[in-house]
């Protein structure tokens, strides 16, 4: 695998941070964090940099790392088996070349963080992730 497990772990954490965000439920709220119990921390907004940071992080990976990241996703999702790693990487390269990129694909899947973790697990790699 050409991508470091630490990088995958960081991406998993950031993907999960994006996944827990909700759309604006009270866009006209005039309250402040103290009054509303800081519940707006789970609401996506125009000043939310988490998704932007995740896109930048994935975009900064080299081609081999992005292909490995997508291959982990495919293996975690069950599209391919761990024994098909080379095929998964080849498929990931084809998908990225034909599509909008790894970040778009990963952010388009609601449970991508779990699937990436499952992909690592299926390869016999246990990432150092905080327990929920």
Image: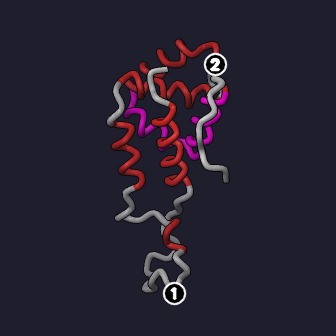
Residue 59 vs residue 96, the one in the foreground: 59
Q: Secondary structure at mark 2?
A: helix
Q: CA distance from mark 2 to mark 1?
A: 50 Å
Residue 52's x, y, as percent?
36, 51
Nearer to the camera, 82 or 111: 82
Q: Residue furthest front?
A: 128
Q: Say above or below: 16 vs 59.
A: below
Give the residue at x 41% y 46%: 54
Chain part drawn in magenta: 98-121
Q: Which quadrant would residue 101 be assigned to in this image?
A: top left
- Mark 1: give few (<14), some (14-19) or many (20+) Cα within 10 Å: few
Label 1: element kind: loop
Whether residues under marks 2 and 1 lie with C-beta atoms below 8 angstroms apart, the answer is no
Query: Mostly what secondary structure, the magenta segment?
Result: helix
Q: Is residue 80 above or below residue 107?
A: above
Q: Is residue 15 magenta?
A: no
Total marks placed: 2
The colour scheme used to paint the residues is secondary structure
* Residue in the image at 63% along x and 23% along y: 123
Q: Which of these two is toward me, 130 or 34?
A: 130
Residue picked out by circle 1: 35
Residue 66, position as x, y percentages in the image? 41, 28
Q: Judge from the rendering whether residue 128 lies leftward or rightward of residue 61; answer left or right.
A: right
Horizontal and vertical percent position of residue 63: 36, 24
* Image quadrant in which you'd find residue 113: top right
| Mark closer to the chain start, 2 or 1 | 1
Residue 19 is marked as none
| Mark 2 lies on residue | 82
Q: Residue at x 52, y 24 (%)?
A: 71
Q: Which residue occupies 41% across, 51% down? A: 51
């Amino acid at each position: 695998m050409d991508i470091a497990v630490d990088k995958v772990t960081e991406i998993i954490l950031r993907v999960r941070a994006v996944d827990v965000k909700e759309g604006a439920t009270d866009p006209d709220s005039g309250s402040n964090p103290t009054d509303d119990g800081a519940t707006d921390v789970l609401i996506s907004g125009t000043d939310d940099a988490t998704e932007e940071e995740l896109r930048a992080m994935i975009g900064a990976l080299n081609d081999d790392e992005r292909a490995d990241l997508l291959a982990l996703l495919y293996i975690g999702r069950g599209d391919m088996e761990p024994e098909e790693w080379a095929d998964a990487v080849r498929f990931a390269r084809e998908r990225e070349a034909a599509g909008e990129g790894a970040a778009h694909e990963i952010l388009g899947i609601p449970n991508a963080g779990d699937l990436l973790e499952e992909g690592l697990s299926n390869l016999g790699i246990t990432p150092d992730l905080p327990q929920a």
